[in-house]
Image: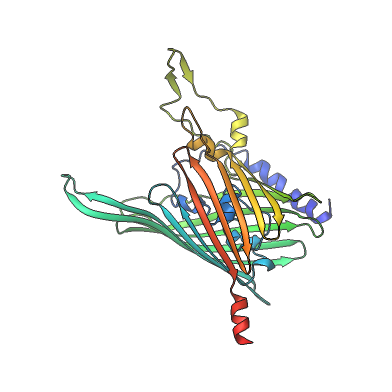
C-alpha cells in the first residue's frame, strides 16, 4: 500500500468511527428527497450510490464531483428514467476541461410526478395539477497526481400545484486512484445546503445530507470490476420499523414482535455492484442495495427489490446504457443513457 493511500485511510477511518456513533433514522425527516435518486443508467446499475470508479460518464458527477476525469471531457450524456406510475426523470450532463480552471461539469435534471386530480373541500372537481422537481448543477474538479478533489453547487426547485420551494446545495468529494492498478477510493459529502424558501404554510426543513465512502477494484487479469459503497454514514441506525407491524398476531394466533438487529443496521448502509467487461464496447452490470430491499419489500415477499441489472453498448462514437432497477415487487424502473463526445463534432467542422 503506497503512502498516499495510507494518508487517505488515516483521515477516513477516524471520521467513519465518529459518524457511525450517531443514532438516527432517515425516513420522512428531510425535503428534496428526490436528490437521492440516481439520475443516470450507470449510477442506477451500480446500486444508486457510487463515489469511486472513474469512467467516461459525465453523469457520475452526481455520485461524486471528483469523478470528473479526462475520459469524460467533451462528452454529453442524455438520460431518461421511468419510475412507477407516471413519474419520469430526464437529465442532461456535459463535461469540459480547461487549462487553468480545472475540469467542469454542467447538469440539468427534471423529475415530473405526473398530473393529479384537484378537488375543493366539497368534493367538486377543479381540474388537474402537476408536481415536479428540477435542479441545476455546476461542478468542478482538480487532479494532482493520484488525488482528485471536486465540488458541485446545485440550485433545486420543487413545485406542487403552483406552490414552490427552493434550496441551494453543495457536494464535496475526493478520489484516490492508484497510479498503476485499477483501484480507487472515493469519499463524498452530499447535499450540504439550505432550504431558501419553504412551501407556503410549511416550516423550513433539513435537506437529505449524506456522507458516502466507497472503493472500486478490478483484479488483474480478470474481466470483472467490483464496487462497494457505504452511504448515510452520519446515521448508524437507519432502520424503520412500521408501527403497525411491531407487535401483531400471526395467523396461528402467536404474537410477532419486530426487532432491530445490529447486522441489519450495518447491512443497510452498503450497496455492492459488479461489472463484467466483455470488451471495449460491451459491459454487463449488476448490483444490490440492501436498504432499498428492506424498506420496499412486502411482508410476505421481496420480489426483486434492491436488485439492478444493466448493460453498456458502444456503437461507433455513441454509447448506449440501459438499466432495469427493481424498487418494489409491483414493478421496476428503466433507465436509458445516450452519450457522445460532442467536442469532436465541432473540431471536425472547424477543420
Residue 198 seen in render: yes
Q: Position of residue 339 (x, y in %)?
A: 57, 65
Q: Is residue 190 left or right of residue 117?
A: right
Colour scheme shown? rainbow
Q: Residue at x 78, y 53 (%)?
A: 5
Q: Position of residue 82 (x, y in %)?
A: 45, 53
Q: Is residue 30 left or right of residue 129?
A: right
Q: Quadrant of residue 18?
A: top right
Q: Quadrant of the C terminus?
A: bottom right
Q: Residue furthest right?
A: 2
Above-or-below relation of 53 to 102: above
Q: Position of residue 78 (x, y in %)?
A: 52, 64
Count how many numbered circles sit on residues in the image: 0
From the viewer's side, name the closer residue of 166 and 133.
133
Residue 197 seen in render: no
From the viewer's side, name the closer residue of 318 and 45.
318
Q: Residue furthest top?
A: 253
Amino acid at each position: 500500500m503506497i503512502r498516499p493511500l495510507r494518508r487517505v485511510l488515516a483521515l477516513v477511518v477516524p471520521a467513519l468511527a465518529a459518524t457511525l456513533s450517531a443514532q438516527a433514522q432517515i425516513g420522512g425527516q428531510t425535503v428534496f428527497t428526490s436528490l437521492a435518486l440516481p439520475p443516470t443508467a450507470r449510477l442506477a446499475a451500480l446500486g444508486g450510490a457510487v463515489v469511486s470508479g472513474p469512467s467516461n460518464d459525465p453523469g457520475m458527477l452526481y455520485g461524486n464531483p471528483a469523478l470528473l476525469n479526462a475520459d469524460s471531457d467533451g462528452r454529453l450524456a442524455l438520460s431518461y428514467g421511468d419510475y412507477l406510475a407516471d413519474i419520469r426523470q430526464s437529465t442532461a450532463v456535459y463535461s469540459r476541461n480547461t487549462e487553468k480552471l480545472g475540469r467542469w461539469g454542467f447538469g440539468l435534471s427534471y423529475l415530473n410526478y405526473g398530473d393529479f386530480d384537484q378537488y375543493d373541500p366539497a368534493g367538486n372537481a377543479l381540474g388537474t395539477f402537476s408536481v415536479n422537481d428540477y435542479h441545476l448543477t455546476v461542478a468542478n474538479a482538480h487532479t494532482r497526481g493520484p488525488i482528485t478533489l471536486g465540488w458541485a453547487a446545485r440550485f433545486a426547485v420543487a413545485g406542487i400545484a403552483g406552490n414552490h420551494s427552493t434550496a441551494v446545495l453543495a457536494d464535496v468529494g475526493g478520489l484516490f486512484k492508484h497510479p498503476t492498478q485499477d483501484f480507487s477510493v472515493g469519499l463524498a459529502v452530499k447535499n450540504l445546503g439550505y432550504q431558501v424558501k419553504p412551501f407556503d404554510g410549511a416550516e423550513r426543513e433539513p435537506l437529505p445530507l449524506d456522507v458516502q465512502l466507497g472503493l472500486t477494484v478490478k483484479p488483474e487479469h480478470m474481466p470483472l470490476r467490483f464496487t462497494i459503497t457505504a452511504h448515510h454514514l452520519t446515521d448508524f441506525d437507519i432502520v424503520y420499523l412500521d408501527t403497525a407491524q411491531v407487535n401483531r398476531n400471526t395467523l396461528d394466533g402467536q404474537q410477532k414482535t419486530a426487532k432491530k438487529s445490529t447486522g441489519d443496521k450495518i447491512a443497510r448502509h452498503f450497496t455492492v455492484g459488479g461489472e463484467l467487461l466483455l470488451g471495449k464496447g460491451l459491459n454487463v452490470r449488476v448490483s444490490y442495495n440492501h436498504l432499498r430491499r428492506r424498506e420496499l419489500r412486502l411482508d410476505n415477499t421481496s420480489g426483486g427489490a434492491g436488485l439492478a441489472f444493466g448493460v453498456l453498448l458502444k456503437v461507433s462514437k455513441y454509447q448506449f446504457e440501459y438499466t432495469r432497477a427493481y424498487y418494489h415487487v409491483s414493478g421496476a424502473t428503466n433507465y436509458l443513457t445516450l452519450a457522445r463526445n460532442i467536442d469532436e463534432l465541432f473540431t471536425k467542422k472547424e477543420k
